[in-house]
Image: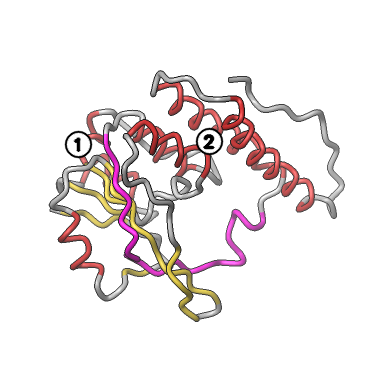
Amino acid sequence: DLHLLSRRQRQMCIRDRSSGDKILFLDADDYLLSDAGDILKKNMAFNDDLIIFTHKNVVNGQIKENYIYPNILGLSYTEALIKLTIENQCLNNCWGKLFKSEIIKNNKIRFDSQMKIGEDAKFVLEYLQESSSLKICNLPLQAYIINEEGAMRKAGLEALGDEIKTYEARINTLRNLQVEISDELMQVLNLTYYNKIIGYLIQDSHKSVSYTHLTLPTT
């Protein structure tokens, strides 16, 4: 069984109403592509804890090319998770992913209602901390509507606290693997977040905002 949850419904439905073996989230302004049913049916036969699908971006009503995620074939779960946690953004969203309902419920994984941005990434990362396998299916499952008025595109430094939460979730996911992460890889992760801070500073540059010294949590 598969349950399809919208953003507004997801917290309540995870807790009270979902009864399927799998859960798939879909933002209210996005939509499944015509062959999504066949793709889901084939992939539900796999027993991976998380299956990540690609998508097609929609810009100004025009469907663009498939968004391709990195190839993790031949990698162990640990190697794949390190690669995706540090080097790729495909863990930032909960949509386009097939979750096991029992992992979410048994570990009481919930969306952080205090966060304005990044709650999806925190949810996915906390889910992966309780998982042992994942798969990437480079077939587009849905159309993702790029919203120029979305929260992420308007966010300024007020989002810094939420970004720190997602950074800590990434660190905890890596620690959970109990392997040593090289300094070079940590620099890649840190640079991603420093670039986000710079983006927020630029976004806020037209406002009268005073800035203090900004540091990321130590690993």
Residue at point 34%, 44% (across, down): 11
Residue at which label 1 appears: 102
Q: Measuring 36% from the left and 29% from the top, which residue is drawn there? A: 129
The residue that appears at 54% across and 75% down in the rendered structure is 59
Number of marks present in the image shown? 2
Please identify the quarter of the rendering in which residue 182 is found.
top right
* Residue at image point 24% right, 34% down: 103
Relative to 80, residue 96 above or below: below
- 145 is within the stretch colored magenta: yes
* Secondary structure beneath label 1: helix
User: Which region of the structure is painted magenta?
Assistant: 133-154
In this rendering, position of residue 100 left or right of residue 117? left
Name the spot of residue 136 as percent of width and height, x first: 33, 51
Residue count near mark 2 (Cα–Cα under 10 Å), binned few <14, some 14–19, many ≥20:
many
Q: Amino acid at mark 1?
A: Glu
Residue 123, position as x, y percentages in the image: 41, 39
Identify the amino acid type marked 2: Thr
Residue projecting furthest to the front: 74
First in sequence: mark 2 vs mark 1: 1
**Which residue is under mark 2?**
166
Location of the C terminus by quadrant is top right
